[in-house]
Image (spheres, rainbow, N blue to C red):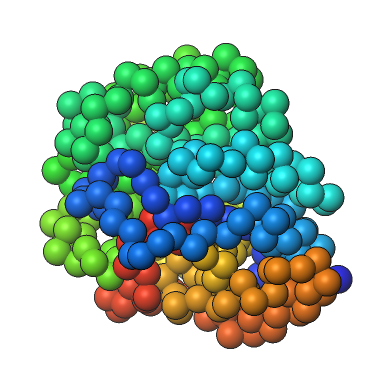
Amino acid sequence: MQQLEDRFGRRFHYLRLSITDACNFKCEYCLPDGYKPEGKPRHLQLDELRRVMTAFAHCGTRKIRITGGEPSLRKDFEQVIEAAANTPLIETVATTTNGYRLAEHAAEWQRRGLQQINVSADSLDGRDFERITGDSRFDLVMRGIDRALELDYRRVKINAVLLKGHNADQLPLFLNYIRDRKVDIRFIELMETGLHHDYFKQHHLAGAVIQQQLLQQGWQLDPADKDAGPALNYSHPDYAGRIGLIMPYAKDFCASCNRLRVSSTGKLHLCLFGEAGIELRDLLGSDNHIPELQQRLHRALISKHETHHLHDGDAGATPHLASIGG
């Protein structure tokens, strides 16, 4: 079947597949009061996840990122990794995790087929890490990153949300960390969500501030890969790692969009800050429905907008990032 493409010529080869909205951290900008389920969770079961992966693969998807919440809270997380790795046509299997299980399980996850790991760590200072996340396991998370590097994962990244008043002055700490480590630090601008308007106003920091500091210190913008997403990546000859910037408030940020999202309850989200989701679950009960599922995906893209509306203060229907996997 034809590759997924919208009205603006953007092609979508990257699926962010959430398998739970639960998380055991209490990050200030996401779940400051901790995870509070609304009734009994109805997360997609393993067979349903397999059908989502298969349908997307037949529509041109080549990369699957398994997300949450915290995806490793699922008891069948290893089976989900294996299912993604064994899906025909899928070339890359990645996950984003808070890293609390990484040190113990990195080898097993790799054996199951995981190739890339993003670890959310908004500070490399243990005290600030605990203040932001509400969790004291900073050392355990960092050991997990070291373990992933020992195992030579294809790519290891640290995701850090830029937060005025927390980590805005910690660029030297991050740079020192990647001087001899082949790790990508990914700075992500804080994005407004439905429940966190006041927090956004207090803590938002433009990525351009970090960008200017990097350029002043001799960092160079890497050429964009053909299938690159919206991140701007910078390299420096004196550092083993790289710095990436995700700046959703920058001009033309959405022009290179190449990813779609499916929530843990089976809804397709065309944008992180868009509609309430397009139902897919009614087609996930049988392999016989996969062709119809593919057709629904293609039809859905007709309604994808050219850009989000964050600039207008419209965060869409997303209550917090854990709800659809960030």
Closest to the observer: 218 or 82?
82
The residue drawn where x is 58% and y is 40% is 77
Q: Quarter-wise, where is residue 126 in the image?
A: top left
Taking 68 as reference, is 113 above or below it?
A: above
Find residue 21 and report its image quarter.
bottom left
Q: Nearer the viewer, residue 299 or 174?
A: 299
Residue 188 seen:
yes
Where is residue 302 shown, x and y percent of the image?
64, 84
Image point 45% across, 66% down: which residue?
272
Q: How many marks?
A: 0
Residue 108 as seen in the image, left or right of residue 239:
right
Q: Is residue 47 left or right of residue 187?
A: right
- x and y percentages locating residue 60 in the rendered image: 78, 62
Residue drawn where x is 37% and y is 46% of the image? 23
The residue nearer to you, when weighing 235 against 184, is 184
User: What residue is drawn where x is 20% and y is 52%?
Assistant: 33
Quarter of the rendering occupied by the N terminus: bottom right
> Which percent across, then down, holds residue 176?
35, 19
Quarter of the image where the C terminus is located: bottom left
